[in-house]
């Protein structure tokens, strides 16, 4: 393979303290020795950091004072020779070093090409490679832990075990096809039970998909309701900040205000919307329309009402617009009302999830978060007990494996010839191999690694 180079750190003008240029490939050491001057008697050996200067090879012009990290194959991220220039941060110096590396023989890396090489060279399997990107993009500590579990092979290990079990069954069946006269009869009931056991374990892994999707993409929650029911106060109490302006005047919120929170390990984008009502104010009318759009795009709607006023006609109008959404009813301002009156509020029987709050006093926030967790369907997997969670690509491949194994059971049940059994088993084996990378096409690899950042 040729030698590639890329900036491996985020570069922010006038802010970054350190910028790293990473090179991987057979020419890495040659490029490093051409550009880097290490004063004194420093030893150029693997896993050693050298101090020195980066100079233009023709003019001798000083580009930067830097550190050089050497990692020779196979003890590197890509299992190739890798060197890193640790330069001063910012744009100018780091871009100059990158350009010198290209002029000296390296090629600018494609997105995810370092991790692709790690996969192709056997340093990582495909689940681990995907976990690298997920770790970089984690939006919560829980998401980071799931990515780390994948990086440590906790997903790949059970998938490989299931694939190995399928291969053992396939080998036994094919042996009967080739040497039927020399072997005892095949125990069909045992084979069926083994396939059924594989399906059970496969279903357990598939059950992590919805939780994994939530951890990676997060949840969008819209707080909606008529004006002056305390939506902005609720956002401020929930986010523990003054994100939204709060007054006693109806219509104070004119636009959608966003806040990023984490609930039960799930990244949550909270949208505080303008109060929904009929108005002649052109600006407020735009805000009301955006509120409706926010409700339509949200994964979960928090329909907020004033506990002091109870369920009003306008609350009913708003409810009719969002009743098909996943919804929690928030009865706010309960600090201003007797508890018996709160219990007497009549709202539609179709609303099953109800939380009472007094946002101005930070009351009911824990109950709200618990209600959100209960409102989101996680399947059979508890959020806090997950070791790993599959992504959409892995889910699709595992579903194909599941279908193939179910077809295999039907084939056995219908007493079809052994050749038909092998067709279904091979389909399952190939699908399982797609997850870890044993069986994967170049187009799949291109699609996966094109989503990475350039320097990863």
Image: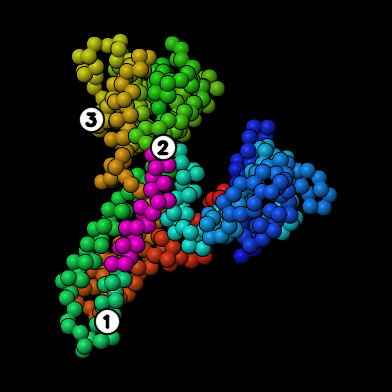
Label 1 – label 3 distance at C-alpha? 62 Å
Which residue shows up at 25% across the image and 61% down it?
A: 199
Asked which secondary structure carries label 3, the reply is loop
Residue furthest toward the bottom? Answer: 181
| Magenta: main secondary structure | helix
Which residue shows up at 37% across the image and 51% down it?
A: 390
Where's residue 313, x and y in %? 33, 21
Give the side of residue 132 with respect to residue 177, left or right. Answer: right
Label 1 – label 2 distance at C-alpha? 49 Å
Asked which secondary structure carries label 2, the reply is helix
Asked if residue 445 is positioned above or below residue 218 in the image, the reply reads below
**Residue 354, picture quadrant:** top left
Q: Which residue is mark 2?
A: 141
Based on the picture, tell me whether residue 369 belongs to the magenta stretch: no
Q: Earlier in the sequence, mark 1 or mark 2?
A: 2
Residue furthest toward the front? Answer: 41
Query: In the rendered image, is residue 99 in sight?
Result: no
Where's residue 100, x and y in %? 74, 51
Circles 3 and 2: CB distance less than 8 Å? no
Q: Which residue is mark 1?
A: 175
Where's residue 456, x and y in %? 56, 50
Asked which secondary structure carries label 1, the reply is helix
Q: Closer to the camera: disc 3 or disc 2?
A: 2
Based on the picture, tell me whether residue 150 belongs to the magenta stretch: yes
Asked if residue 55 is positioned above or below residue 183 in the image, the reply reads above
Which stretch is magenta? 141-165
Q: Which residue is mark 3?
A: 349
Q: For this rendering, which residue is in front, 156 or 364?
A: 156
Circles 1 and 3: CB distance less than 8 Å? no
Asked if residue 102 is positioned above or below residue 245 in the image, the reply reads below
Check disc 2: other Cα within 10 Å, few if <14, some if 14-19, many if 20+: some
């Amino acid at each position: 393979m040729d030698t590639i180079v890329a900036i491996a750190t985020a570069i922010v003008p006038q802010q970054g303290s350190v910028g790293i240029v990473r090179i991987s490939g057979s020419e890495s050491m040659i490029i490093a020795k051409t550009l880097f001057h290490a004063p004194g008697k420093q030893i150029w050996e693997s896993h050693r950091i050298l101090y020195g200067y980066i100079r233009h090879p023709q003019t001798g012009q000083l580009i930067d004072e830097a550190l050089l990290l050497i990692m020779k194959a196979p003890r590197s991220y890509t299992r190739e020779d890798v060197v890193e220039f640790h330069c001063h941060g910012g744009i100018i110096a780091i871009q100059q070093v990158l350009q010198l590396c290209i002029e000296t023989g390296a090629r600018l890396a494609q997105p995810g090409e370092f991790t692709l090489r790690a996969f192709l060279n056997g340093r990582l399997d495909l689940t681990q490679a995907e976990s690298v990107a997920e770790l970089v993009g984690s939006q919560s500590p829980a998401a980071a832990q799931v990515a780390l579990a994948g990086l440590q092979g906790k997903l790949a290990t059970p998938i490989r075990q299931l694939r190995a079990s399928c291969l053992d069954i396939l080998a036994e069946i094919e042996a009967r096809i080739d040497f039927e006269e020399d072997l005892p009869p095949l125990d069909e009931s045992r084979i069926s039970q083994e396939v059924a056991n594989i399906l059970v374990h496969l279903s357990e892994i598939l059950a992590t998909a919805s939780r994994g999707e939530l951890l990676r993409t997060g949840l969008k929650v819209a707080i909606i309701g008529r004006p002056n029911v305390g939506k902005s106060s609720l956002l401020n109490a929930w986010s523990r900040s003054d994100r939204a302006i709060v007054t006693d005047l109806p219509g104070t919120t004119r636009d959608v205000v966003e806040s990023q929170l984490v609930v039960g390990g799930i990244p949550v984008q909270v949208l505080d919307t303008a109060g929904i009502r009929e108005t002649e104010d052109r600006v407020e009318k735009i805000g009301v329309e955006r509120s409706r759009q926010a409700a339509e795009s949200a994964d979960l709607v928090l329909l907020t009402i004033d506990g002091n006023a109870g369920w009003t006609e306008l609350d009913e109008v708003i409810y009719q617009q969002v009743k098909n959404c996943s919804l929690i009813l928030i009865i706010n301002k309960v600090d201003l009302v007797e508890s018996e009156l709160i219990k007497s509020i009549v709202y539609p029987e179709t609303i099953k999830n109800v939380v009472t709050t007094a946002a101005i006093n930070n009351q009911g926030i824990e109950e709200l978060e618990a209600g959100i967790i209960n409102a989101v369907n996680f399947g059979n997997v508890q959020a806090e007990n997950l070791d790993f969670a599959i992504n959409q690509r892995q889910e699709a491949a595992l579903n194909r494996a599941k279908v193939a194994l179910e077809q295999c059971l039907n084939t056995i049940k219908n007493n079809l010839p052994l050749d038909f059994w092998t067709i279904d088993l091979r389909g399952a084996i190939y699908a399982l191999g797609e997850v870890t990378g044993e069986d994967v096409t170049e187009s799949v690899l291109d699609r996966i690694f094109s989503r990475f950042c350039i320097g990863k």
